[in-house]
Image: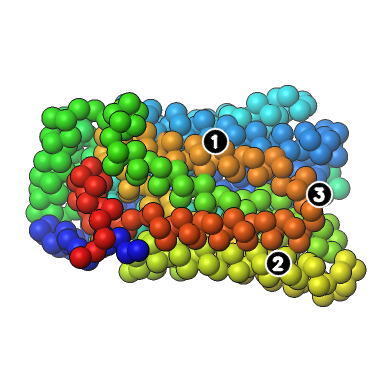
Amino acid sequence: MTLAGAGDRPANTLPPLGTGPHRRRLGLVALIATFGGLLFGYDTGVINGALRPMTAELGLTPFTEGVVTSSLVFAAAFGAMLGGPLSDRWGRRKTIILLAVMFFVGTLLCVFTPGFGVLVAGRIMLGLAVGGASTVVPVFLAEMAPYEIRGSLAGRNELMIVVGQLAAFVVNAIIGNTLGHLDGVWRIMLAICAIPAIVLFFGMLRMPESPRWLVDKGRTDEALRVLGTIRSPERAEAELAEVARVAREDSAAHQLGWRAVLTNKNLRKILLIGIGVGIAQQLTGINSIMYFGQTVLVESGFEESAALIANIAPGVIAVIGAVIALAMMDRFDRRKTFIIGFTLTTVSHLLIGVASMVLPVGNPVRPYVILALVVLFVGSMQTFLNVAVWVYLSEIFPLHMRGFGIGVAVFALWVTNGFLSLYFLSLVQWVGITGTFFLFAAVGALALLFVWRFVPETRGRTLEELEEDVTTGAIYLPKG
């Protein structure tokens, strides 16, 4: 089944994007906003190396280890649900500034915690901020971006997420191997997060609001002034006219709350597709590797200190994959990217399962083979799935339901992530690495079928064109 794609109706009525100061300004706006992604990555990745010394100092049990890890993730689900609607009402920019404050406060609670309870409270605060950032920052970038480079611009947030995770792995390895003898070394690992939170707060104070959000609120003059700083003058005028036209049509219909979405078959369908894409991404088990990679490597045969260093390899390949993904994002259709990605990750899971089965514990080759296959999996995930999924979720929903739609989809994503975080170590203990990755492979095959059958194409069209096609159902029609 082939669905309507980028080539059906190109958005060729707008003046060329051009070059000049407006492109540099757009790049600066994206850089500052993606510090939210950097914080997302560091806060989710730092637990990978901090958990073992944290457990030793605070006397955590396997269950409370799972609670500490998953509390951030479950809180992120609610942060995603709250962040989208809040940004619809309050503005993308103001919401990101609030998230920066939450990142800072959550970091302080974790660093200075006297025990388990305050630590979990801090992790919940960080989780709310991470979840909010995971919905608001991609939407902000997609709404600021011209359609020609929307994929690569919105995808920069995912690049910053994996840069944040890599930074966490590197910091963990350096601090763990140089200061590991100190009590509270994990507190130092967590404290680093305060720096990008400060940069995000003060940087966003100087950034503009989303012009599409301003148009939606009737503040057209402000929207034109913002567009004038990130587009050429003629492009700003033309783009504003298109955005305003679609906003007027939507306003004439009514605001799309959850009741309106659930009673409209086309909007309900796109919401379910968004939820499905988010869940499928998480069921690859990518975040189980990013959170518990050190544990997986220890289980495969590495010594604990060696695993801490070896764990940097997946972080490095994640950044490389994200850079490649950004280069591809505006050249390859989203559907093709998803299909390639789920095929490669499913094969990677099968290979990890086979390797752990045929290479017994104690075989000196085993840890290195499993590490290489984990790197292959993470590279496939980052190159073909992670960036594409976040870009897709930021662009697929109509303007009046965008905050609600991405909030619900990312809520489902984070809940899936949370359950995997809570039970991954128990699953490894129960069925071993072999059974765990064979299970991931089976789920990956189902995800591949879902994408092939249901997911429509979005590349190469403006947000306003996508909005019209989603609302009318044209986006689901086969190519003629």
Q: Earlier in the sequence, mark 1 or mark 2?
A: 1
Q: Nearer the viewer, residue 207 or 68?
A: 68
Q: Nearer the viewer, residue 283 or 21?
A: 283
Q: Residue at x 51, y 39 (%)?
A: 412
Nearer to us of marks 1 and 2 is: 2
Relative image position of residue 304 (x, y in whole percent): 83, 57
Q: Are marks 2 and 3 in contact (CB under 8 Å)?
A: no
Q: Are marks 1 and 2 in contact (CB under 8 Å)?
A: no
The residue where tag 1 is placed is 76
Q: Residue at x 30, y 38 (%)?
A: 265
The three-letter code of the residue at mark 1 reads Ala
Nearer to us of marks 3 and 1 is: 3
Helix, strand or loop at disc 3?
A: helix
Where is the N terminus found, in terms of image quarters? bottom left
Which mark is on residue 352? 2
**Left or right position of 446 against 423:** left
Q: CA distance from mark 3 to mark 1?
A: 27 Å
Structural crowding at the residue carrying mark 3, measured as other residues with C-alpha within 10 Å and reported as few (<14), some (14–19) or many (≥20): few
